[in-house]
Image (tube, rainbow, N blue to C red):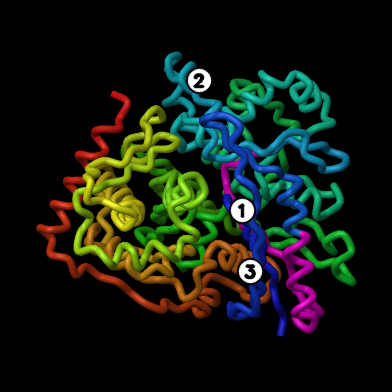
């Protein structure tokens, strides 16, 4: 049986998942990388460290699965979307740390463009809010603050791309410099109507079009690789996709109105909206879900910056816990939250408020509160933010969801899943495998390779393992959500 290897290059780690052709997970392995925060609001990754982790993951999996690796059909890639890196065109070596989607240093330039009234123009072309969450303003900051990089981008000796383009370039020894449409569409430089880089936007952000990668469909071939000699022969790179769109694809949300929520470092809630661009609900964005055989599919999206990242903050920065598994039993030990709310506005708030200057706070603390209350408040904040997005969708565009497919590592936390169903009143269907982003990219690869012919074939591969529906009385859920809304009001910048 053919196997397919998917690399899921996420915000916190690089994971390799080995699938067979019908989607069963054969093996998995991951390596974490550093979160570099030299200044408040700055978040960087060492792209060289990530590249070495890719090789380390493949080396580990190949050693333990020699028979499967002997019949690898392809490599697929899912990646953190808005994180951007500038690297040497000839060698692939990064010329600066990658600027992560959480990084805020492009905010002043976004504010400047908004004051000029350019926000609506940019949104019409890209579907995105004019915000430093997306790649364009980060690249502008690099160009303005590093004249050497600006010069090299202009003369062609350096290029810029999201993490998929960087990895593909290195995996192919510099022969292929390409990205897929879903990743390109997260940069503020890409026109989602024309499916191409927008020259006017590139000029506005001072990024040469010639420094940006070729765009291809997710199921296209992106060259070949042997992982710098780790494999005896080269395999095609087929199936490349931004992680959230890949999860939408993996969850078989092929029809308008179908939705998924990915619980990860942040949270993305995507709803398939069909083949025509539709205005996003207030506070949301319009996403390019995928392009298949020349036909685009669009989605509306709500974005949450801090979900599992809030838990990591409690572990890494505050030292309150050793690992994330400690939080669920602590949350279960309490009958309620004791009036304690954690608003994780560490990099502002996204959907629906888009307040970049809001700052995080724990409110409602009393002398009675302890670690369990903080643990519970951190987990609860994920569910409350999802409720924020769902309410904004319903009010702003009439999209009212009764059920959502859920994926991501935190879906293994049963308490969190049940609380999310309780607070939102929406039924959650959990994916049969938490690695939905990796599987979505692999599904695109299986299409591109012809191992599976169409969406109907792919729809037969997946199943939902479990579901959660509301148990908490609606009146109690409403009261707890009102407490959250009051806590949020205390951190808003205005």
In front here: 50 or 39?
39
* Mark 1 crowdedness (10 Å alpha carbons): few <14, some 14-19, many ≥20: many
- Residue at which label 1 appears: 79
Q: In terms of image quadrants, where is residue 159?
A: top right
Q: Residue at x 81, y 67 (%)?
A: 235
* Mark 3 crowdedness (10 Å alpha carbons): few <14, some 14-19, many ≥20: many
Q: Residue furthest front?
A: 367
Residue 283 screen position, x and y as percent: 34, 38
| Magenta residues, start to end | 55-84
In front here: 105 or 136?
105
Q: Looking at the picture, does residue 181 appear above or below residue 137? A: below
Residue 419 screen position, x and y as percent: 27, 63
- Residue at which label 2 appears: 108
Residue 395 screen position, x and y as percent: 22, 44
Q: Is residue 72 left or right of residue 394?
A: right
For the residues carrying marks 3 and 1, which lies nearer the camera in this image? 1
Residue 310 appears in view: yes
Q: Secondary structure at mark 2?
A: helix
Q: CA distance from mark 2 to mark 1?
A: 27 Å
Q: Secondary structure at mark 3?
A: helix
In front here: 104 or 164?
104
């Amino acid at each position: 049986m053919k196997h397919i290897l998917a690399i899921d290059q996420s915000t916190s780690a690089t994971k390799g998942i080995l699938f067979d052709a019908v989607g069963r997970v054969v093996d998995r392995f991951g390596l974490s990388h550093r979160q570099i925060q030299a200044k408040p609001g700055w978040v960087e990754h060492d792209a060289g460290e990530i590249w070495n982790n890719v090789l380390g993951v493949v080396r580990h999996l190949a050693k333990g699965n020699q028979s499967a690796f002997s019949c690898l059909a392809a490599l697929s890639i899912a990646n953190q979307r808005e994180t951007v890196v500038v690297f040497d065109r000839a060698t692939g070596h990064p010329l600066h740390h990658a600027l992560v989607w959480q990084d805020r240093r492009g905010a002043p330039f976004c504010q400047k463009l908004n004051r000029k009234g350019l926000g609506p123009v940019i949104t019409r072309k890209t579907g995105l809010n004019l915000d430093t969450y997306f790649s364009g303003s980060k690249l502008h900051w690099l160009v303005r603050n590093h004249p050497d990089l600006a010069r090299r981008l202009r003369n062609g000796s350096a290029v810029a791309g999201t993490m998929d383009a960087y990895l593909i370039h290195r995996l192919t020894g510099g022969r292929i410099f390409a990205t897929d449409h879903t990743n390109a569409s997260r940069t503020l430089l890409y026109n989602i109507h024309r499916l191409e880089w927008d020259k006017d936007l590139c000029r506005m952000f001072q990024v040469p079009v010639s420094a940006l990668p070729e765009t291809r469909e997710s199921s296209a071939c992106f060259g070949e690789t042997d992982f710098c000699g780790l494999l005896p022969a080269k395999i095609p790179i087929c199936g490349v996709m931004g992680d959230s769109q890949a999860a939408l694809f993996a969850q078989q949300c092929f029809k308008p109105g179908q939705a998924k929520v990915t619980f990860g470092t942040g949270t993305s809630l995507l709803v398939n909206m069909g083949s025509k661009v539709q205005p996003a609900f207030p506070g949301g964005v319009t996403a390019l879900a995928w392009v298949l055989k020349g036909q685009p599919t669009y989605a509306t999206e709500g974005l949450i910056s801090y979900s599992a990242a809030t838990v990591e903050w409690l572990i890494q920065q505050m030292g309150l816990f050793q690992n994330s598994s400690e939080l669920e039993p602590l949350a279960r030990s309490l009958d309620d939250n004791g009036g304690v709310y954690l608003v994780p506005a560490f990099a502002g708030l996204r959907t629906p408020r888009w307040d970049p200057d809001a700052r995080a706070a724990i409110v409602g603390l009393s002398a009675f509160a302890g670690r369990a209350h903080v643990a519970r408040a951190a987990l609860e904040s994920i569910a409350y933010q999802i409720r924020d997005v769902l309410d904004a969708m319903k009010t702003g565009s009439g999209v009212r969801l009764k059920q959502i497919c859920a994926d991501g590592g935190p879906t293994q936390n049963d308490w969190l899943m049940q609380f999310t169903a309780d607070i939102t009143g929406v039924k959650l269907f959990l994916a049969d495998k938490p690695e939905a982003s990796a599987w979505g990219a692999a599904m695109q690869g299986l299409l591109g390779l012809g191992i599976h012919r169409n969406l109907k074939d792919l729809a037969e591969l997946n199943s939902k393992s479990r579901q959660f529906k509301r148990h908490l009385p609606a009146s109690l859920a409403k009261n707890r959500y009102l407490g959250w809304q009051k806590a949020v009001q205390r951190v808003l910048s205005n």
